[in-house]
Image (tube, grey):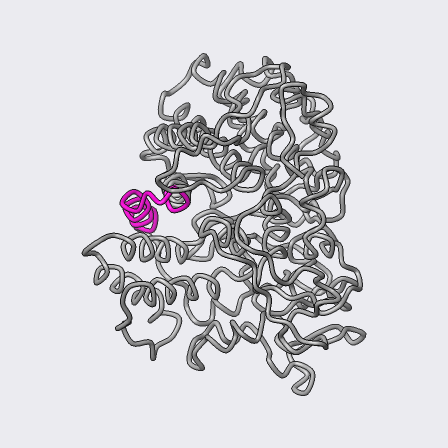
Amino acid sequence: MKKIRVYILALVVGLLVLPTSCNKDYLETRPTDQLAAGDVFNSLTGAWGAINGVHRSVYIQYNSVQAHGGFPGLYLFIDFLGTDLVFNTTANGWYLNGYKWVDHRNERSNTVLYWNNLYRLISNVNQIINNIDNISGPEAEKKAIKGQAQTYRAWAHFMLVQLWADRFVPGGQNSHAGVPYMEEITFIGKERNSVADVYLKINADLTAAITNLDGYNRANKSHINKSVAQAVQAQVALVQGNWNLAATAANAARQGYSFMSTAQHQDGYNQQNNPENLWAHYVQEDQTLYFYSYYAQMSHNFNSTIIRQSPKSITKQLYDMISATDVRKTFWYPNAVADKQPFVQSNGVRFNYMNSKFKSVSTSDSRGDFPMLRVAEMYLIEAEALARQAGKEELAKDVLFLLAKNRDPQYVRSTKTGAAFIEEILVQRRVELWGEGRNWTDLKRLNLPLVRPTAANAGMGFHVESFATVVNVPAGGNIWTWMIPRAEIDANPNLQQNPA
């Protein structure tokens, strides 16, 4: 297979975050992980190599931590904090302390080191953004590179401010502490921008990215095109309660994409060329993360101790909300133990309601092209944003119908109104995006409590309180905000820790 030359920039910038050098086994071409910015940005070839290195950095292992299998690992942490994903056992629980609501509140845990991972990405794209204009070459190519970097910078700060700051309050001042928004290359530790300012800068980056990416045709879906930037813009606008922009951006992002077929739903959500994928990894055979891969944690077929001993389930409560004729109902097995479904390794265990939504390439290959953004989410954002605007509920029902009818041929256009209709959209969102890292951040943006349905025994589609520890959390409060890593606080006197 032809290998793409990539450059992982090594210049230390930002908040005195020291990026861990990439293990040489993760690089397609050696030695390219220790290039100074001046060496990279003396040609468009070098700049393309730099942005390809950023694409690659989305799914490498970070910090030599088992559960840091790229940014899909961050999405797993987010979903394990939520309502709908169940740990059936404490065996091999790499994410167990996250599930218990311990790690994100521990400034010395591995989980909060995703702060470093995100700022490392920001440091690299800042070098691209701040150097690309000085390179000789066609403007269209330079804009394509810069627009991708701007989208990454906006996306990374969006993830940071959602997790490490109190929620954005639509219509509020939002003057509370956000995160440092890094736009320059510097060794000086920065103070935290307000939440309002962070979102202002995120939106400015996305607006610029959308302009720069106009007309760019990407090589594959691990790259970022205009529709990806518009999709991130829709996500951001939804959190801000900017309903008109959320609906408009989501609609624009989904243009030109089709729904997957019923057969493609069974493929395991692991192929970047899936027609619904807006942005997905493209993981080549020599780039596997082995036991650190998302699919080594969430598939049912990979031959690992994690999968054999600790398959993950949906809650019975959410499963029962799915109609019998919905293709998504086939992702989970309510009678897995008795029916001996789905396929598991001969020495593996089954729990009822365990999932088969995600599949690795094979029993011996944990690879999968993780879907960072799917077109289905754009339909759901558009529907929700329209439903929250006066006079647009019927339009929202039309949009939701397009998605829901594709999933369930028997779906009938909703007759619900007001809060009941919005709740229908949110249930569709929970089902559609199960396991893809949206559940907990949705609770936070909507200012909803965590309410986990519980039972005494595992394997029944309920959380077991002795495993989960935390089953009810009121909306709001410090516990919904992640702690900044202690090493970062110690290194940067301008940075204030979140309240304990």
Pinpoint residue 398: horizontal percent, then vertical percent: 25, 64
Residue at x-position 48% and y-position 68%: 265
Residue at x-position 35% and y-position 62%: 422
Pinpoint residue 277: horizontal percent, then vertical percent: 45, 53
Residue situated in front as seen by the camera: 299 or 115: 115
Q: Is residue 212 above or below residue 374?
A: above
Q: Is residue 306 above or below residue 152?
A: below
Q: Residue furthest bottom?
A: 338
Q: Is residue 411 magenta?
A: no
Residue situated in front as seen by the camera: 311 or 1: 311
Q: Is residue 213 above or below residue 90?
A: above
Q: Is residue 21 left or right of residue 53?
A: right
Residue situated in front as seen by the camera: 425 or 231: 425
| Start-end of magenta stretch | 237-255
Q: Is residue 253 magenta?
A: yes
Pinpoint residue 482: horizontal percent, then vertical percent: 63, 41
Q: Is residue 158 left or right of residue 234?
A: right
Pinpoint residue 288: horizontal percent, then vertical percent: 69, 49
